[in-house]
Image (cartoon, rainbow, N blue to C red):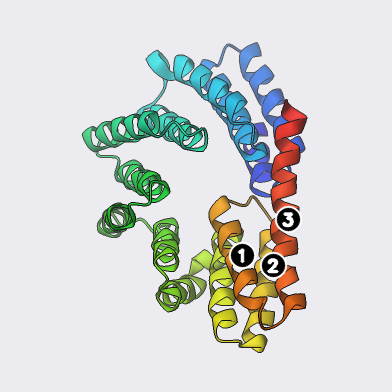
């Protein structure tokens, strides 16, 4: 129950509450010698550290999780830990190690016929390649992830689609990115603050390129409101900043709404890192 509450707090960006709840969950599991419960709580603490921006601490916690799950964890626990560690290594700039972890995750998930895990591994490899500027290869991994999800009947595949939208924006195809964003906003993805906010920032970027102030106002307001509900990622902030840049020649005051959002969110991430140091 504590881990469920902690997960909910984390999703709402209440990192302090999440940390306290995961600490309590770890202590409770340890008191009854529930090693799996301890490992899951430690993984949650790693997630808190990751979203605070303290990648070194997150890495150490995920390594601890790996030791706990090595002989007693379920396949899904082991695979998820490889995924978590891989993303930490991306953020730390250790891209070769990140690739090794994601490839190992994909191998294990294929062997276990874990289609969701395999799709997530393909998506992660796409993220890695996108960081390297290999957009065509990245998009192919996102497409593979989407195909696996579709064939397996997985409903929550919008993360893979929003990443395809980001690829299109990076290529300068803002209209193509907007088409995917609007597709997602008409689905259950609209209920996921991180995805929905990213979609609205893409819509705002498209509106700014056309000097459509009415659409900009609606999209920007929706993006900001959704972006305050939970965690944010660099991809979202990058699009928000690009939207501000595109709006600035038309209306600097409106552009400041995007810049202000980015500034506040990046400051919060930086503060999280400093507070953990």
Residue 215 in the image: state x and y as whole percent. Answer: 62, 85
Residue 153 in the image: state x and y as whole percent. Answer: 31, 58
Q: Which residue is mark 1?
A: 240
Residue 37 appears in the rendering: no
7 up-or-down from 233: above or below: above
* Residue depicted at x 69% and y 81%: 217
Q: Which residue is mark 2?
A: 258
Real-space Cα distance between discs 2 and 1?
Answer: 6 Å
117 up-or-down from 134: above or below: above
Q: Secondary structure at mark 3?
A: helix
Q: Quadrant of residue 236 in the image?
A: bottom right
* Residue depicted at x 75% and y 32%: 274
Mark positioned earlier in the residue sequence (2 or 1): 1
The 10 Å Cα crowd at callout 3, few under 14, some 14 to 19, many 20 or more, is some
Q: Residue furthest front?
A: 249
The 10 Å Cα crowd at callout 2, few under 14, some 14 to 19, many 20 or more, is many
Q: Secondary structure at mark 2?
A: helix
Q: Quadrant of residue 220 in the image?
A: bottom right
Q: Which residue is mark 3?
A: 263
- Given residues 250 and 145, the one toward you in this image is 250
Real-space Cα distance between discs 1 and 3?
Answer: 10 Å
Figure quadrant of the N terminus? top right
Residue 122 in the image: state x and y as whole percent. Answer: 32, 46
Mark positioned earlier in the residue sequence (3 or 2): 2
């Amino acid at each position: 129950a504590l881990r469920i509450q902690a997960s909910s707090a984390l999703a709402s960006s209440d990192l302090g509450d999440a940390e306290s709840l995961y600490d309590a969950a770890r202590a409770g599991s340890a008191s009854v010698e529930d090693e799996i419960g301890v490992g899951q709580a430690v993984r949650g603490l790693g997630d808190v550290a990751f979203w605070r921006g303290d990648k070194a601490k997150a890495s150490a916690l995920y390594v601890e999780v790996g030791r706990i799950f090595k002989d007693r964890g379920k396949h899904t626990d082991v695979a998820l830990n490889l995924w978590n560690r891989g993303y930490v290594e991306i953020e730390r700039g250790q891209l070769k190690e990140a690739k090794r972890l994601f490839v190992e995750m994909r191998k294990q998930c294929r062997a276990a016929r874990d289609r969701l895990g395999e799709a997530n591994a393909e998506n992660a490899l796409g993220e890695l390649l996108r960081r390297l500027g290999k957009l065509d290869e990245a998009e192919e991994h996102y497409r593979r992830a989407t195909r696996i999800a579709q064939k397996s009947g997985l409903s929550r595949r919008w993360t893979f689609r929003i990443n395809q939208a980001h690829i299109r924006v990076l290529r300068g195809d803002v209209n193509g990115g907007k088409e995917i964003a609007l597709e997602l906003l008409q689905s259950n993805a609209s209920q996921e603050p991180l995805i929905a906010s990213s979609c609205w920032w893409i819509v705002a970027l498209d509106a700014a390129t056309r000097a459509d102030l009415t659409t900009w106002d609606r999209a920007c307001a929706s993006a900001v409101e959704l972006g305050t509900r939970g965690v944010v990622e660099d991809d979202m902030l990058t699009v928000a900043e690009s939207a501000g840049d595109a709006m600035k020649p038309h209306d600097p005051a409106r552009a400041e709404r995007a810049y202000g959002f980015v500034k506040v969110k990046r400051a919060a991430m930086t503060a999280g890192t400093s507070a953990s140091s």
